[in-house]
Amino acid sequence: MTKSRATLDKDNAPDLIRGSDPNRSMASIHELSDFTETARLNGDLVHVKELNIKNFEMKSKLLTFIRMCRDLRHENLNPYMGFLADPTHPCIVMEYCSRGSLNDIVHNEDFKLDWDFKLSLLTDLVRGIRYLHSSALKFHGHLTSKNCVIDSRFVLKITDYGVNGIMERCKALFVFEAKDLLWSAPEMLRDELLLQKGTEKADIYSMSIIFQEVALRTDPYSTTGLPPEEVVKKLKKPPPLIRPSVTPQAAPPQFIQIMKQCWAEAPEMRPSIDDVYDQFKKITGGKKANIVDTMFKMLEKYSTDLEDIVAERTTQLEEEKKKTDQLLYRMLPPTVADNLKLGRSVAAESFEDVTIYFSDIVGFTTISAMSTPMQVVDLLNDLYTMFDATIDNHDVYKVETIGDAYMVVSGLPVRNGNRHAGEIGTMALVLLSQCGKFTIRHMPEVPLRLRIGLHTGN
């Protein structure tokens, strides 16, 4: 192994150009200081993860271990690209995965995950763990949805493997927060030494919690409604046993059965990763779940539904357009509204032969003082509904209503010769007659009197 492959020391530093990536939460376990940066390594974008190790020193046994981690190669492992052996800021350099973590995708509501898509990602997870358990590394140690990353082809890759081995060889300890321990097996929570190292059976338990996250698209143990501190406390000291709850509506029964087997309280009762892999093969019918095939199926489904969706959206658009037109025609004369809709300018126009109608309610101030606001609203709504129905039978145009004032005109916006005075006069008589029969809902004994004024001329 050359120096550039094993470590990125001072001689290689110019090739590693850091740059923070605030839009991608590829956060890992707390011991990486929740510190994740992107960098350029020989022109390629990589992830740089800083380890919380003071006075770091690259010794021969550690170098051998890092080389072993570097040599692990599987399509579902995120490979080591190098190691920055800085005394104060040692970093693992790994391949950049543009889709972020599995945790990111699970909590992104804009990202649609059907069951085939979920199964494809989880199959990748099982295959990656199966390879790790058969390798010289033997286990991951601190598996979470945050250190399962997704590349541009939607392939899940496990990262942060070997971190516990590096920490152990540097005699450094992990410092966990309660939220970081939600994936940890109960036996690890009860044994600090075991928690620092990890085991194969603990990986199986952690994997089952990730299964729950993906199935429900929620945080671990979210169905319990308890804060992380309380969950960890109950995991350490049962009974009763505390586990997530996954309904048959969220996942197939076979999957739920595997998940429950994997989070068994006794480590020896949990299946091996080979057993889990075999059960996944039964779920998939022996075929490897392929994310590309899944996406093609989704595209076919979307294409089938697209015509109906477009028709539905078109209907909704037409309905909204009708509402907009109705509002516009209520506010403006039809000729003005039509010109505005067509984007034409509206020139000011003079109308010489018109008759204007004004009216208000006699004693409206007194009536309002004796009424609640909603009663006043109901009164005006009832009255103007009656008025609007009446004026539709005449060649007139309602200009506006302000409070109890009602203004109507004839002779515009469409000229009607000398008929404007007759149209307004007839309309006024009809309105006056109707007001004599009008009943105020909350004051049925009070008559409604209308005061009308007309102006006509040329």
Image (spheres, rainbow, N blue to C red):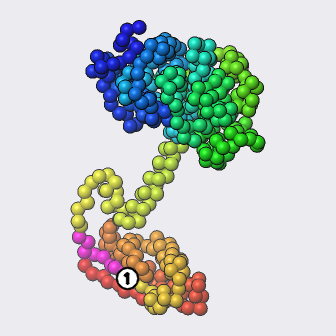
Residue at the spot 56% in from the left edge and 32% down from the top edge: 145
Quadrant of the rendered structure where residue 261 is?
top right
At numbered mark 1, what does the secondary structure look like: helix, strand or loop? strand
Residue 59 appears left or right of 126 = left
Q: Residues within 10 Å of mark 1 (few under 14, many from 20)?
A: some
Q: Position of residue 258 (x, y in %)?
A: 72, 27
Q: Is residue 27 above or below residue 287?
A: below
Residue at image location 34% in from the left, 79% down from the top: 356
Q: Position of residue 83 (x, y in %)?
A: 40, 20
Compared across the picture, whether 275 is left or right of 438 comes to: right
Q: Nearer the viewer, residue 431 or 300?
A: 300
- Look at 48% across and 89% down and name the residue there: 369
Which of the two residues, 134 or 419, is positioned nearer the viewer here?
134
Q: Which residue is mark 1?
A: 358
Q: Quadrant of the C terminus?
A: bottom left
* Residue 109 located left or right of residue 12: right
Q: Can the viewer see residue 216?
A: yes
In this rendering, the answer to whether 37 lies above or below 383 is above
- The x and y percentages for residue 49 are 42, 28
| Residue range (magenta) | 350-358
Q: Is residue 18 above or below residue 377?
A: above
Image quadrant of residue 408?
A: bottom left
375 in the magenta segment? no
User: Could you tell me which quadrant the N terminus lies in?
Assistant: top left
Seen from the viewer's position, the closer of residues 361 and 107 is 107
Q: Is 129 placed above or below 401 here? A: above
Residue 155, position as x, y percentages in the image? 52, 22
Whether residue 119 is visible here, answered yes or no, is no
Please report the residue visible at 65 percent of the width from the left and 27 percent of the height from the top: 202
The amino acid type of the residue labelled 1 equals Phe
